[in-house]
Amino acid sequence: MRGYRLWLVVILAIAAISIWMSLPDNPGIHILGMDRDVKIVQGLDLQGGSRVLLQAAPGTDFDDQTMEQAAKNVERRVNGLGVTEAVVQRQEGGRIIVELPGVRQQAVAFESIKSTGLLEFVDFSTVTPGTVPEGACILTTEQVARAEASLPEGEAPRPYDQYTCPSEDLENPVEEPALLQSGQPYRTIMTGAGLSDAAATLQGQLGTQWAVNFVVRDGGNRVNDFINYVANNANRSMAIVLDGRLLSYPTIQADLAASAAAGTMDGGIITGDFTRDEAQILAAQLKYGALPIPLDIIAFDTIGPSLGQISVDRSIRAGIIGVITVLLFMLIYYRVPGIAASMALLLFAVINFALFKFIPVTLSLPAITGFLISIGTAVDGNILIFERMKEELRAGRSMDRAIEAGFERAWTSIRDSNISTIIICLILYFFGNAFGASPVQGFAITLGMGLVINLFTAVVATRTFLHTIVLLIGNQLRERQELLGV
């Protein structure tokens, strides 16, 4: 019995931690260098948000690998903007669907999603400050090289004066011709591929001007060309061009040029007339990579939180009714063993909820459905154990031996049934991942977690609780076996 007492201490400790993590005003874990929030993450169908449908721009060549890379970069960008638990899924026909739970700044997210993010540092050493307006369409050698590399074999490259940029005026969507330098493209010194990190920061004496700090990648593509340009062009300009648009062309300061010449330069600052949102978009694009193809937004819709709240309320009500029904069944039919099973079921529920908050698991309606189903399966193992235990008692075994036999002989059935269902959950999860069916993934995750936790609560916890009850009232149970459900 001493082993069960030790297990009882462990179970009570797990229960206490789980209850603390389940509290609605939980402050999170901020000890021993761990800084982690413990909170529920709701999916798009619960908290509301936006859904965006993207498609490869007309005339763009793409394959599965290109679309996969585009989807990964979109996901990194959106998460980098602080959109929690964004869901990015590929669809047939060069389409990508993006779900943005709780998004409030749709225009910011949309711009960061669809922009290809080709950042270039361009040679403007001969350009007089103020002669080229910011936002102008600029043709560069990198743009030309990429355009010509994508041409079908045998097709002649187009003349430089035929390169254009999409119009920024939605009411007048006329292509804008790209500016040239004496009939030639401006020279690209380095692209954003040479950067390893970027972040939006406040600059200026009053800390009111938004800029983007960047760090060059050690050994990155054209990084040496970039450093040499900075070292040799003190007090001259270098242009920052994003997707063919001139962001700014700041003057290279003498101290930065000296640092580059000395080999100690590891980054710099991109300045311009940025708002906070524009700086965050640019930092996300630099940090998480350029899209391999341009994407157009072909549809989007907004989902209000009111529908999600109704769904949450009904799901909570269904969960409470389900738990109470199962508890009543176990107490009425199995009596004292049912008490142990009911305590294990409550422990099962609180552990699940604590893990949902700690991991965190994004709770959508299918995910909640998976959890509710797992509540029903959580007592399946107890039913097998108790029925086997009743058979042993009817065969004349002692109570203690019948309890042990019930757990030992039912274990293989419990193990095999749960493992087989867990395998199905894994298949559902990978099926959802392959075909972009995130609701299927949410269902598989919560149901699978419930089955794994059930192996602990239905066997170890129930066994510990039942032995504890036997220690307290064992004599009464031996005299009145009807209390054991016989």
Image (tube, rainbow, N blue to C red):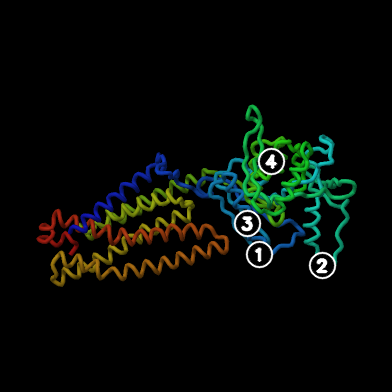
> What mark, if any, has residue 224 been given in the picture?
none
Residue wearing tag 3: 71
Disc 4 and disc 3: Cα gap in Å? 38 Å
Q: Is residue 265 left or right of residue 373?
A: right
Amino acid type of the residue that numbered disc 3 sits on in the rendered structure: Ala
> What mark, if any, has residue 259 been given in the picture?
4
The answer to which of 482 and 93 lies nearer the viewer is: 93
Disc 1 and disc 4: Cα gap in Å? 44 Å
Amino acid type of the residue that numbered disc 4 sits on in the rendered structure: Ser
Task: Say which element carries label 3.
Answer: helix
Q: Position of residue 370 (x, y in %)?
A: 43, 58
**Which dot, 2 or 3, sits closer to the camera?**
2
Q: Earlier in the sequence, mark 4 or mark 2?
A: 2
Q: Is residue 430 above or below residue 246?
A: below
Near mark 3 (Cα within 10 A), the count class, few <14, some 14-19 or many ≥20, is many
> What mark, if any, has residue 64 been given in the picture?
1
Q: Is residue 151 above or below residue 322?
A: below
In the rendered image, the residue lying farthest to the front is: 262
Q: Position of residue 430 (x, y in %)?
A: 51, 64
The answer to which of 337 and 25 lies nearer the viewer is: 25
Count the marks. Answer: 4
Q: Earlier in the sequence, mark 1 or mark 4?
A: 1
> What mark, if any, has residue 153 been given in the picture?
2
